[in-house]
């Protein structure tokens, strides 16, 4: 018990003394996951709205597939992208393996189905009169999509935060594609996973606490947003 | 007459249920047309077709003389101002709602501001402009939706059941506005209602839609005047009607053309209202005969073909038109 309580004290000391090593890792994690969300949102949100706007063959199948992909195992994404990005792989010449870019791509792939699917749900929950009203006012398809994005903006932000949470908390992709290189690709989760076994328990615990705080803050922000409406 | 819409052999089904089946329908330009029918008769579907939100399964819709089936729906829609039943306002300010259609058309901020202010002034909405669209009354929403359509200066304004969710004041305002449009004859307006009296008093033409089919409606026998409560009479021009005793006020009197009795001689019955006149027109509609009788006012009388033959009625014949006071409605 002493070991654990002392470790917590040490972890809090690291946090409140603004230990550089800890915050470099935090910053790396936040930056990577944030960019991954932006990437996935740029693709997933428009696609989600498009699925609501248009009727097409295979719509149900697509949604079922997205539902399945929401539970995509991170190590599988890591494995597939490793195969693509490794020196011998088809994209090996880009030299992306063990860079933050590789983690960003991997996390974006991981959360694209989440953001896409939750955007469908967000746009789908808009008032059924929204589409005929926009059409009657002469909106083009792009303008109709913008109206959906506007009307469902809080649900869409919630979708982005859910994606961010998933990206920030995953470890398989960051480990396999990033390699936990100190000061470069070391993220909160890879540090926790790998530093603990190296005996750096306080360091890992400090990151664990900060990871929880980040998750809590994200959800708090979403709820604040929803209250405004 | 100049027609804005010319529709032939139109049909539309939801899954397998046919909701519209219209052989022929012409809608005049710069006139107010009312579509009357019970709930579920296909009015909203017809309006969705007229505003090009849906395409018919079969048939032709000519708009301004052009065949529309192959035309781009989006550009057709931009010529229509459609105020749907229970209109939806976007989650933005009233001002932005009214200006939305102009924004879709790429108008500049300045142009939108001026146009929105003008239309809001006309419809007495200025005080609401900066309000959020949430939390407005049904009447306010209806007026804002009307402003949102009017600001686009469309070829035609289509209003689906505009009176359904209105308080009395807003109802009167919309009625006055419609009556003014009808008198001005500068806008084409199509509106639906299940209230036939309202339709008759506000429109130039009435179309009756029942189970997706169009039926001609016998218009007429709606008279404007005043009630004299002392003598229980309704005075419209030179005509005096005896009305039910409980009627103390009202501006319009209505008698169903089928409740009027036509005869060669004045009837010595209990009917209190008897008018002498001359038959000025006769037409056959769906096996019934529609007569116009010119008296102190112009009556429309609907009789069966059999009665026509029995009475041997012909154009120019002097006749009597009678009805019981209990069959008179004053509103």
Image (spheres, helix red, strand yellow):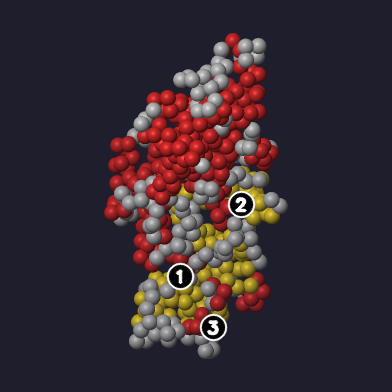
Residue annotated with mark 3: B265
> Farthest residue toward the right?
B16
Kindly check if marks 2 and 3 are in contact, taking CB atoms under 8 A apart as contact.
no
Residue closest to the eye, B269 or B182: B182
Of pointers 2 and 1, the one earlier in the residue sequence: 2
Residue closest to the eye, B296 or B107: B107
User: Could you give the CA–CA distance between mark 1 and mark 3, rounded to whole angstroms?
Assistant: 25 Å
Q: From the viewer's perspective, is residue B260 above or below residue B144?
A: below
Coordinates of residue B160 in the picture (x, y in percent):
49, 56
Chain letter for the residue marked with disc 2 in the picture: B
Image quadrant holding the C terminus of chain B, namely: bottom left
Per the image, label 1 sits on a secondary structure element best described as strand
Residue annotated with mark 1: B222
Q: Residues within 10 Å of mark 2 (few under 14, many from 20)?
A: some
Residue A161 visible to the viewer: no
Residue at 38 percent across and 57 percent down: it is B136
Chain letter for the residue marked with disc 1 in the picture: B
- The nearer-to-camera label among 1 and 3 is 1
Residue at 38 percent across and 75 percent down: it is B250
Q: In this view, does B193 lie to the left or right of B116?
A: right
Chain letter for the residue marked with disc 3 in the picture: B
């Amino acid at each position: 018990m002493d070991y654990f309580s002392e470790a917590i004290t040490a972890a809090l000391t690291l946090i409140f003394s603004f230990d550089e090593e800890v915050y470099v890792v935090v910053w790396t994690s936040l930056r990577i996951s944030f960019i991954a969300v932006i990437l996935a949102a740029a693709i997933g949100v428009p696609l989600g709205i498009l699925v609501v706007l248009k009727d097409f063959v295979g719509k149900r199948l697509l949604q079922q597939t997205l539902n399945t992909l929401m539970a995509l195992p991170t190590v599988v994404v890591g494995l597939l992208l490793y195969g693509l990005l490794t020196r011998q792989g088809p994209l090996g010449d880009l030299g992306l393996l063990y860079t933050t870019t590789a983690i960003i791509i991997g996390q974006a792939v991981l959360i694209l189905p989440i953001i896409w699917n939750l955007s469908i749900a967000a746009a789908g929950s808009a008032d059924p009169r929204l589409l005929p009203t926009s059409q009657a006012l002469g909106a083009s398809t792009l303008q109709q999509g913008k109206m959906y994005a506007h009307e469902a903006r809080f649900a869409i932000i919630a979708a982005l935060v859910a994606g961010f949470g998933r990206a920030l908390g995953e470890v398989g992709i960051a480990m396999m594609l990033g390699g936990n290189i100190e000061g470069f690709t070391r993220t909160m989760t890879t540090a926790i996973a790998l530093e603990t076994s190296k005996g750096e328990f306080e360091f890992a615990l400090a990151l664990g606490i900060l990871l929880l705080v980040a998750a809590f803050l994200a959800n708090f922000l979403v709820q604040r947003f929803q209250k405004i409406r | 007459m100049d027609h804005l819409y010319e529709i032939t052999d139109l049909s539309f089904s939801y899954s397998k249920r046919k909701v519209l089946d219209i052989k022929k329908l012409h809608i005049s330009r710069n006139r107010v047309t009312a579509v009357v029918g019970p709930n579920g008769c296909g009015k909203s579907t017809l309006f969705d077709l007229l505003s090009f939100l849906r395409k018919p399964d079969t048939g032709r819709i000519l708009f301004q003389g052009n065949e529309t089936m192959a035309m781009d729906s989006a550009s057709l829609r931009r010529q229509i101002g459609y105020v749907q039943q229970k209109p939806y306002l976007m989650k933005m300010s009233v001002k932005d709602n009214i200006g939305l259609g102009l924004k879709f058309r790429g108008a500049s901020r300045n142009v939108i501001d001026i146009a929105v202010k003008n239309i809001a002034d006309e419809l007495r909405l200025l005080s609401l402009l900066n309000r959020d669209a949430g939390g407005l009354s049904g009447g306010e929403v209806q007026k804002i939706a009307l402003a949102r359509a009017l600001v686009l200066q469309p070829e035609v304004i289509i209003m689906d059941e505009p009176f359904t969710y209105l308080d009395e004041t807003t109802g009167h305002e919309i009625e006055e506005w419609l009556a003014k449009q009808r008198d001005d004859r500068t806008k084409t307006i199509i509106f639906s209602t299940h209230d036939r009296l309202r339709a008759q008093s506000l429109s130039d033409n009435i179309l009756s839609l029942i189970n997706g089919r169009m039926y001609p409606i016998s218009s007429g026998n709606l008279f404007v005047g005043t009630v004299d409560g002392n003598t229980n009479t309704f005075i419209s021009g030179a005509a005096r009607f005896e009305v039910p005793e409980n009627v103390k006020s009202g501006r319009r009197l209505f008698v169903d053309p089928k409740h009027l009795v036509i005869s060669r001689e004045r009837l010595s019955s209990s009917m209190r209202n008897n008018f002498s006149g001359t038959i000025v027109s006769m037409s056959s509609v769906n096996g019934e005969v529609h007569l116009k009788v010119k008296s102190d006012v112009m009556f429309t009388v609907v009789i069966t073909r059999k009665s026509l033959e029995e009475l041997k009625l012909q154009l120019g014949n002097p006749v009597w038109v009678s009805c019981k006071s209990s069959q008179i409605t004053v509103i």
